[in-house]
Amino acid sequence: MVKNFLIGCICLFSLSAYAQNGTVSPYSYFGIGDFRSGGTVENQMMGGLRMYADSIHVNLRNPGAYSKLRLTTYTAGISHREFRLKDANEQQNLSVTNLDYLAIGFPIAKNAGIGFGLMPFSSVGYSLNQQTLNAAQDTVTNVFAGEGGLNRAYLSIGFEPIKDLSLGATINFNFGSLLYQRIQSVENVQLGTLDDRESKINGFDFNYALNYTPTIKEKYTLYTHLGVNTQVNLVSKNSERIGSFSLSNGAEVEVIDVDLAAQGLLNTELKIPTITTVGLGFGENKKWFVGGEYSFQKFSEFRNDFLAQENVVFEDASVMALGTYFIPDYRSISGYFNRITYRAGLRYEQTGLMVNNKEINNLGITFGFGLPLGTSFSNLNLGFELGKRGTTDAGLVEESYFKVNVGLSLNDKWFVKRKIN
């Protein structure tokens, strides 16, 4: 049953990975789109903390956590987000639903495990309208639209060389396409102009983790974490079409392919700077945990020569996250609610994006529940997030969002030697 579920999810992901618009945010216009969380529902609902690891859950952001796995674990997650987009003049409500990740992890030896999977890395999905007056006082309408994104396939390994110290490494392959379109029309003019751009992108990065989790007074655990996600080196193969089209029927007129090679823009490089994370937590195993993390990134070094954008500056980015969980009694037989894992968290993100001289920051409050399934170690995880990003100042958009996450974590035993009586 579990294996059939996994095969079905793989087929679903392969069909949806390229088709889905992972966001409807106007801020996905900048950079290479909105960066996705990259964590399971369990991690996301603790503010996005990556340091915590146990024996029955996959941790997508902390490869050292694979050393803790004792069972083969299949996991998949979906999310639904409701957006309220508001500027100084109007408000719009939009929504989007996505498959967030599909992964498997399993032990390969005592205190060692590996995992692999697929997930989105960034998403582009926006449609913006802008109207101005030209010198003749005619209305000029610009429509900006974008879609696509990058997906990520990964392979991780984690092991524990000495007691309480775990190390891990992940190799990520990122791939996908970004599509951008600008259409301009002028009042009382029959033809409009178009500018279509496409970037086909791929490249690698690596994620390293060190976790030190000593036991305190035989009952409590101190959690310390150091993570380094190396610079993402991407290669972009670009194309551009410009020309005119009929406003009456949309037919293209005199559209040509731009000679990007002559401009040195046919093949460009994108470098997303290294992210370093430090974390500290404390808790009692299978009962409660509380922790905090701080991540920082020199995002000011990011650039995209092919899609140079006006009124935007990239600055150094950082994330502060707090998270906790509580289980009343995981061994309870009669009280189901006592075996539920209750999670909560808080995350404040300085995205490094500055538009029209205004910082675009993100604040999110998270909470959720881990619901045991039957008598096994499998569980259904529900999560919720309330947040706000951006501002209505300087002609910008403020996003208020509500996200619902559903994650399934199924456990099984592999490589069990059969006994013959």
Image (cartoon, helix red, strand yellow):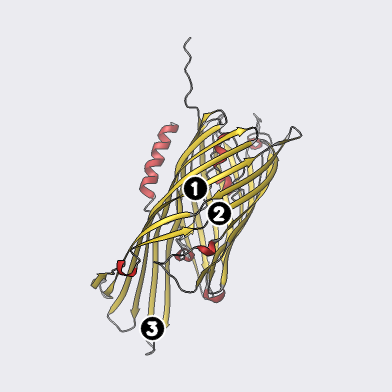
What secondary structure is marked by label 2?
strand
C-alpha separation, residue under disc 1 versus residue under disc 3: 49 Å
Q: Which mark is residue 139?
A: 3
Closer to us: mark 1 or mark 3? 1
Describe residue 170's horizontal placement relative to residue 198 as left or right.
right
Which one is earlier in the sequence, the residue at label 1 or at label 3?
A: 3
Residue at far top of view:
421
Q: Amino acid at mark 2?
A: Ile
At 48% across and 14% down in the image, what residue appears? 419
Picture coordinates of residue 17, whole percent (x, y): 39, 50
Residue 148 picture location, percent across and down: 39, 58
Task: State the residue in front, 104 or 190.
Answer: 104
Q: Of helix, strand and loop, which one carries label 1?
A: strand
Q: Are marks 3 and 2 in contact (CB under 8 Å)?
A: no
Q: Earlier in the sequence, mark 3 or mark 2?
A: 3
Say which element carries label 3: strand
Q: Position of residue 130 (x, y in %)?
A: 43, 76
Q: Nearer the viewer, mark 3 or mark 2?
A: 2
**Which disc number belongs to residue 275?**
2
Given the image, on which type of amino acid does mark 1 rest? Phe
Look at 39% across and 37% down and name the residue there.
7
Q: Amino acid at mark 3?
A: Thr
